[in-house]
Image (tube, rainbow, N blue to C red):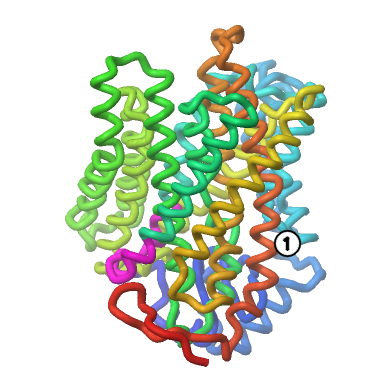
Amino acid sequence: MANEDVPHNQDKVLDGISAIDNAVYAISRDREVKTTIDILKYFKNEKQIEDKLDKKKSSRIEASDVSHYFTLAILAASSWGLLYCAFGSDWRWDGPWSRLALVAAVAWGGGRLLQATTTLPALLAALATGIVATNLDFLDMRDYSEVDTFLRKIYPVVILGKASLGWNVNYMRSEWKRVLSLGSLPWAAEVAAVTVSTHLLFGFPWLWGVLLGSIYASVSCAVVMPSVARQQRPGSSRNWPQLVCTAGGVDTALSVGVYGLVYSYMFVDASDVYKYVKAALTLFVGVALGVGWGSLARVAPHRDDPYVTELRILLVLLGGLLGNFGTMMLGWGGVGGVAVLACNATAAHHWARAGWPLNRNPAATAYRVAWAALEPMVFAYSGTFFKIDASTWDTLLLGLAVLAVSLGVRLAVTWAVCAGLSTRERLYVCAAWVPKSIVPAVLCPLAIDTLLPNVDDPRMEYAETLMRLLVQLIIITTPLGFLLTDRLGPWLLREGNTEPKRNSSYGVESEET
């Protein structure tokens, strides 16, 4: 049945604990630990869960940890053996295809180690793995451009689908002004700042500036969501996880949609009239397709279907893949990403009404597992495009100026948009709006992949600069945003902080201590 994967006493079990992504994280007070619902459902109160979390956080290696990694090693060896038996020498340990797998495995292991020793996001280690691999001439995804292009049509479906399964549509309706303004105004201001600064500093044509700005301005809420969820206080007048998640989703939808639109305009041959029509309709067509497909969740599959879990996952996953590949084939880049966001948010809304809690259901777990497998590949393979040569340092030096200007503009607009919040709350939102990682990593090499068949194309210089600036952006803003939110969040949201009264528009009217 639809609810069989979620314990009936889950809310009681988790009483007093701030929880999000319960199939992956249990978050209690000032810590978070990877665990599962199956573990949590056997405990009756917070103290028992706390004791379990203490054991999970201790340095002692438990038998379950050894078994977990032993199982992963067996699966990895079996997969490699199967590929070698099926395809021969190309999958030898030093073969061209084995290099792809080896870099992804090292990126995954390095990420786990970095996160365990510093708490910093694992993606930083994956990105560094790719940069080292390409500068040691071990792997360059330019040599696998067809594979890379194919994977970059899959990544957005999983990433965007995973995020939008946690959107609360009712919250978005009630707080639509705040969500829309926080998601769109800082994004638009930063796009404009990046476009102008790259035109002045790098001589970028205006369209190339917009192409870069559309993904340069994409905030990565996934970097700070565990911290935001942990810092949510029971009884607080603000739902910080939903605000960050949904407003960040608007930001991401704009990034994916506008990037796809500009990319198609620049690289797809079509008449000017057709391009203008696409420019006017891209976001609307994406939302319409996504809501239409996601609305199928109301009737298909039936909640009493014995395979309801599997069919629901396949419905949104295959629909998202079809939408993204199909719209790219038709030259409507950006439509697919927006459609995935709208589809999964709509489907999750209908599933919640049928008994599946938002972001705590088998579909959300499936997307999390898929992203856990893809994340090291996204950042490691993107890192292999970052070749260090004599011109790199000049680019990165000017890139610091672009970053300073664009981030300053973004935070100034974010501060202004949050005018109804207290000073500390505005600082908190600004901190959460700093990190950039996932969308830049997915889209940064696409222009290079497109121009590779003609390496003498003068536009290749712009594509290389675009990629370098985005890698620099990830390296600087990801740890900065994570640390600001994680370390300052408890102080900024502590009890006794100024709480504004609500009104009908932004939920605030005046401040009182």
Q: Is residue 123 left or right of residue 214?
A: right
Residue at figure coordinates x 57%, y 63% from the top left: 430
Residue 470: x %, y % from top left: 62, 37
* Residue 370 at least partly seen: no
For this rendering, which residue is in front, 337 or 116? 337
Residue 272: x %, y % from top left: 28, 18
For this rendering, which residue is in front, 234 or 261? 261
* Residue 118 at least partly seen: yes
Residue 476: x %, y % from top left: 70, 48
Residue 311: x %, y % from top left: 31, 50
Splitting the image into 4 quarters, where does residue 474 fall?
A: top right
For this rendering, which residue is in front, 295 or 422? 422
Name the residue tied to disc 1.
Answer: 119
Splitting the image into 4 quarters, where does residue 484 fall?
A: bottom right
Identify the residue at the far left of this view: 299
Please give the count of numbered marks on the rendered protein: 1
The verdict on residue 167 being magenta is yes
Residue at figure coordinates x 57%, y 33% from the top left: 444
Residue at figure coordinates x 37%, y 82% from the top left: 509
Bin the neighbour count of mark 1 within 10 Å (Cα to Cα): few under 14, some 14-19, many 20 and up: some
Q: Magenta region's main secondary structure?
A: helix
Residue at figure coordinates x 53%, y 83% from the top left: 233
Q: Is residue 496 left or right of residue 317?
A: right
Q: Which segment did they paint magenta? A: 162-179
